[in-house]
Image (cartoon, rainbow, N blue to C red):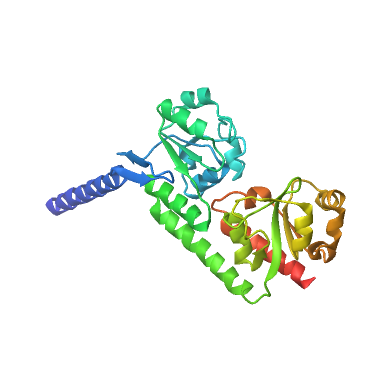
Amino acid sequence: MKKKITILLVFAFIFTSCKKEIEKQTINLPINVTDDLGVIFQSNNAPQRIISLAPNLTEIIYELNLDSLLIGNTKYCNYPEQAKQIEKVGDLLTVDYEKIIMLNPDLIFITTEGNSKESYEKLQRLGFKVFVSNPRNFDGIKKTVVDISKIFAKEKIAQNKIAIWDKRIEIIEAESSNFKLQKGMFLISLKPVMLAGNNTFVNEFLKIVGIKNIAFESQANYPVFSREEILKRNPQIIIHTIFNNNADAEISQNYPEWKKIDAIKNHKIIYVDPDLFFRPGPRYSIAVEKLWNKLKEIAIN
């Protein structure tokens, strides 16, 4: 009997050891992931000390449960709440290189949209590994999430998250297809009048909820329009980011002639959170859902 128990224990030990070895090998397999600049990140081990230089990338890191590895981010990284407590290494354009050197990260995540080419090149000259993200639309966001998940062997988490996001978008698209198409504009800034163009992830919000962007013909990502052109195109819906509590007054004071626009005449102005709508990250489908719910509210009133 003792001999049988001993044999069982030996087998259990061997099985456990093999399982641990397999897990170790899975994590330590050579990593080869191509970033959005076409540069291949290669490593035999998953990074253990990482820095994010963009709020959307910080959110992705938390979404993939990698926050225990995050040793630095920017002062604009304010979501989730815990991100505020991470060591700050500058903002999007201004980087504290001395602090980054002191923190000595294994990998730094940056974006082409917010971070500068100079920062990228200097970080490389300092000997740091840099992974660049450039999500221009929902598919680009999902690619970034998958890319980062591959670096840390978190693909399963990424796949599950993406499946939830896709389903949420699918439901909204089905609902919005029953609504009459309306013209609208996503107001990025009031002075100058800057709108979201056709080739932006923000424009995708409009498409999903059934709004035809009045700036869809523009080749620029964020075109500037004259006040007269807005009046001429006459949007039925205006989406504007909330920067202060006097947004209504600012629109009417700066552009009194806009009172003739259908959106203003019919009180069809939707205010949204810029942090939620301007970050191409894991809260994309939540932003779409919030926009859709607000659109349904003003459609009823």
Residue furthest to the bottom: 178
Residue 204, quarter of picture:
bottom right
**In the image, what residue occupies the spot 38% across and 41% down?**
39
> Along the horizontal axis of the image, is 301 left or right of 148?
right
Residue 180 point in image, percent of width and height = 68, 75
Q: Nearer the viewer, residue 137 or 151?
A: 137
In the displayed orientation, state which residue is furthest to the left: 3
Report the front residue among 48 and 51. 51
Number of on-image labels:
0
Left or right side of 24 for 267: right
Residue 152 visible, this orientation = no
Which residue is more in the foreground, 218 or 82? 218
- Horizontally, residue 35 falls left or right of residue 294, namely left
Is residue 62 left or right of 154 when viewed as pictured? right
Q: Residue at x 83, y 57 (%)?
A: 258
Residue 48: x %, y % from top left: 40, 36
Residue 97: % across, % down:
51, 25
